Image (cartoon, grey):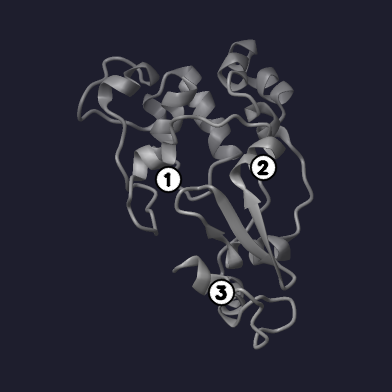
Amino acid sequence: MAFEDWFPPRRDERASEGFYTPLQEDSYNAYLNSGVAFRSQRVCSIEAIVAAAGEQIRPYLSYLPGLIDLLGRICRYVPSWVHEFYATLWIDPQHRFMHFAFRGRDYRLMSFRVREILRLQEQPIRLHEVCYGQTAPPRRPHGGLGPPTDLVYHCFIEPFGEGLSRTPSDLIPTARVLDAIMRRTLLLRMGYHESLTRIQLWILNSLM
């Protein structure tokens, strides 16, 4: 849907109080009635991670500025705010900004400001684009393009090659710890504990 259709210049007066348009209101109610579970992001401090996995894991999480803070940042979680955010969210196709409504008013958050808030640096490679390319939503967990074997071989127990198993149990110890950390914090909780999705493989390769 075009931005102008999702966010018209003025709030639609037909929408109930607290909503920007009737369509966004319907989207919000659909979320509530769908039974989809929304939960707060789980966090884990670097001290707790190091205490469990050893000091050798720290460099893998500290070389990307902002990642440690993102893993351990504790924030207030209000379910109704999260529902409203996702029900109204519009993301620029070039990822320059996101636009959303809150309590009947619309807001725009630029990507550079998000990086400032989260203390992240812009990277020349976007793993989501590498994996999914121009695939239109919805993007399935096991969809997209997986990394080539010679790119991820260092993440797996030898012998490893084309066509061989790629599950968490096949990972070397360091990679298994990193995969467990990502699953328990930043990644969506979508099951598939017995396998690795393609985007998970790209993330592991970038951390290793």
Structural crowding at the residue carrying mark 3, measured as other residues with C-alpha within 10 Å and reported as few (<14), some (14–19) or many (≥20): some
* Amino acid type, label 2: Arg
**Outermost residue toward the left in this view:** 163
* Amino acid type, label 3: Ser
**Cα distance, mark 3 to mark 2?**
27 Å
According to the image, label 1 marks what residue? 192
**Cα distance, mark 1 to mark 2?**
33 Å
Q: Quadrant of residue 138?
A: bottom left
Q: Quadrant of residue 57?
A: top right
Q: Nearer the viewer, residue 201 or 95?
A: 95
Which residue is pictured at 66% across the width and 46% down the height? 41
According to the image, label 2 marks what residue? 113
- Residue 159's place in the image compared with 190, above or below, is above
Q: Earlier in the sequence, mark 3 or mark 2?
A: 3
Nearer the camera: disc 3 or disc 2: 2
Q: Is residue 31 left or right of residue 195?
A: right
Q: Nearer the viewer, residue 23 or 122?
A: 122
On the image, the x and y values in percent for residue 164 come to 24, 28
* Amino acid type, label 1: Tyr
On the image, the x and y values in percent for residue 130 come to 36, 37
**Outermost residue toward the right in this view:** 76
Q: How many marks?
A: 3
User: Can residue 197 be seen?
Assistant: no
- Residue 34's place in the image compared with 108, above or below, is below
Which residue is pictured at 29% across the width and 40% down the height? 145
Nearer the camera: disc 1 or disc 2: 2
- Residue 29's place in the image compared with 181, above or below, is below
According to the image, label 3 marks what residue? 27
Structural crowding at the residue carrying mark 1, measured as other residues with C-alpha within 10 Å and reported as few (<14), some (14–19) or many (≥20): few
Q: Earlier in the sequence, mark 3 or mark 1?
A: 3
